[in-house]
Amino acid sequence: MRYPANRLMRYPDKGYIAGVCHGMGEHTGIDPILWRALVVFTGGGLFVYLALWVFLKKEENYH
C-alpha cells in the first residue's frame, strides 16, 4: 500500500535521526536542511520534533 506523496510521514532511512525533517521536506517541498535549522534555532523546535517523531507514521519501503 502506497501513501500519497503529500501525506506527512517520517523517513527514518533517509534522515539523520528519525527522518522527521526529511518528511517535512517531502511534504512541503522545502529543503530538509531548512527544517533542521528551524528545529535547532527555535525555542519550541525540539519539542515539536519529538512530538512528530512519536506521532507520525513511518514510511515503509514496499517493493
Image (cartoon, helix red, strand yellow):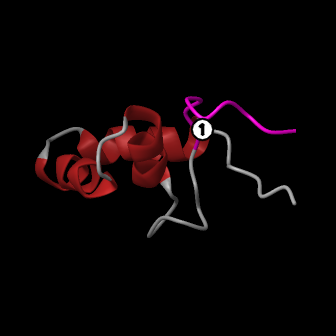
59 is within the stretch colored magenta:
no
| Overall secondary structure of the magenta section | loop
- Image quadrant containing the N terminus: top right
Q: Quadrant of residue 8?
A: top right
Establish if 17 lies above or below 4.
below
Helix, strand or loop at mark 1: loop
Residue at numbered disc 1:
56
4 is within the stretch colored magenta:
yes
Q: Position of residue 49 (x, y in %)?
A: 39, 45
Q: What residue is drawn where x is 84% and y is 55%? A: 62
Q: What residue is drawn where x is 12% and y is 51%? A: 41
- Image quadrant containing the C terminus: bottom right
The part of the chain drawn in magenta is 1-9
Q: Residues within 10 Å of mark 1 (few under 14, many from 20)?
A: some
Locate residue 35 relative to residue 23 in the image: left or right: left
Q: What residue is drawn where x is 55% and y is 29%? A: 6
Locate residue 22 relative to residue 44 in the image: left or right: right
Establish if 34 lies above or below 51.
below
Q: What residue is drawn where x is 73% and y is 34%? A: 3
Locate residue 4 relative to residue 45 in the image: left or right: right
The three-letter code of the residue at mark 1 reads Leu
Q: Quadrant of residue 2?
A: top right
